[in-house]
Amino acid sequence: MQKNLSLFRKCVDFLLPLRCVKCGAILEKQEGLCVSCWPQVPFIAKPYCSCCGRPFDFEIEESALCGVCMNHKPHYTTARSVFCYTEDSRDLILKFKHADNLYAAPLYGKWMSQILDNIKDPLCVPVPLHWMRLFKRTYNQAALLAHEIAHLKGWPYMPSILKRIKRTPSQGHLSQKDRLKNVRGAFSVATFEKPRLSGRTVLLVDDVFTTGATLDACAQTLLKAGAREVHAVTLGRVVKPMI
C-alpha cells in the first residue's frame, strides 16, 4: 500500500510539478520560491511598529509605535504583513488577485499564519468585496487567504459576518485622506450576525496593506458590532518613506 502511494505521488509530481510562485520554475522538494526568486522578496522581520507592523530601518524597543500610529491610533490592535509590496514582490499578489493563480493560496496562507503571534482562537474574517465586484472577479482573494489560515490554525472561518454595502471606487491612486473618506460607511455587520461576534477576537484578512484605511474601517465596524478586539494580517504591505 505504501509503495502504491509513493508511486502515485511520483506520478502526480511528474504531471503537475511544483513551481515557483514568482517565476514558474520547477521546484524539486516543496512549494514556494526558487533560489533565484527568494532573495528578491523583501520579507518583513522585526523591528517593526507594534501596532501596524510597519518595518523600522533601525533597532528600537518592541513596543515602539511608528509616527502614523502615534498620531492616529487605528481601531485594530495589531496588523502584520508577510512582505513589503515592491516592484520585485508585487507580481506575487497581482497574479493571485487578477490572473487566477489560486494554486498559491495554501502557500500564502501558510506564510501569513506563521507571523501571527499571541492571538487566541479568533474568528477569521476576510475583507469583503462588494457583490458587483465579486460577480465580475468571481472570487474574493481575501476570503481564500482567510480560509487557508483558518484551516491551518483550526480557527473558525466566518466569511459572511462583514459585508461591504457601499460600492467604493478603487483606492489605488487615492491619498490617505481620500481613502479614509472613500471607505467611510462602506461596511456593516447584519443584526443577526452580532451574537456570534459579541465578545470575540477577530482576525481580519486582506491581500495588501496600503495605508490601512480599509482595515481600519472594517475594524471600527466590527468593534461597534460587539467584537472585543480586532487584529489584521495581509500578504503584502506598501511601505512609503517617512517624511
Image (spheres, rainbow, N blue to C red):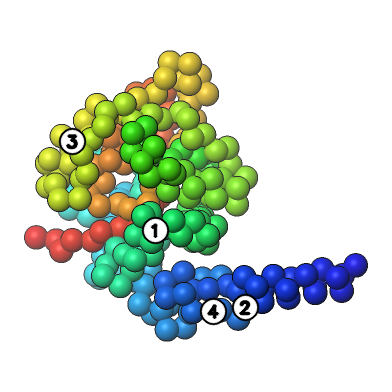
Name the mark on residue 29.
2
Q: Amino acid at mark 4?
A: Ile
Alpha carbon distance from label 1 to label 2: 25 Å
The residue tagged with tag 1: helix, strand or loop? loop
Q: Amino acid at mark 2?
A: Lys
Look at the image and tell me whether residue 132 can be seen.
Answer: yes
| Front disc: 3 or 4 | 4
Q: Is residue 240 left or right of residue 161?
A: left
Look at the image and tell me whether residue 50 can be seen.
Answer: no
| Residue at the far bottom in the pictured view | 36
| Residue at the far right in the pictured view | 1
Percent from the top left, x then y, of residue 84? 31, 64
Classed neighbour count for the residue bearing mark 1: other residues with Cα under 10 Å, few (<14), some (14–19), many (≥20): few
Quarter of the image with the N terminus is bottom right
How many callouts does the rendering have? 4
Q: Earlier in the sequence, mark 2 or mark 3?
A: 2
Q: Earlier in the sequence, mark 1 or mark 2?
A: 2
> Are the residues tagged 3 and 4 within 8 Å (C-beta)?
no
Q: Earlier in the sequence, mark 1 or mark 4?
A: 4
Name the mark on residue 26.
4
| Front disc: 1 or 2 | 1
Q: Amino acid at mark 3?
A: Asn
> Are the residues tagged 4 and 2 within 8 Å (C-beta)?
no
From this view, report whether residue 181 is shown above or below residue 18: above
Q: Earlier in the sequence, mark 3 or mark 4?
A: 4
> Are the residues tagged 2 and 3 within 8 Å (C-beta)?
no
Q: Is residue 200 left or right of residue 242?
A: right
Q: What residue is rendered at 65% in x and 73% in y? A: 15
Mark 3 lies on residue: 182
Q: Amino acid at mark 1?
A: Ala
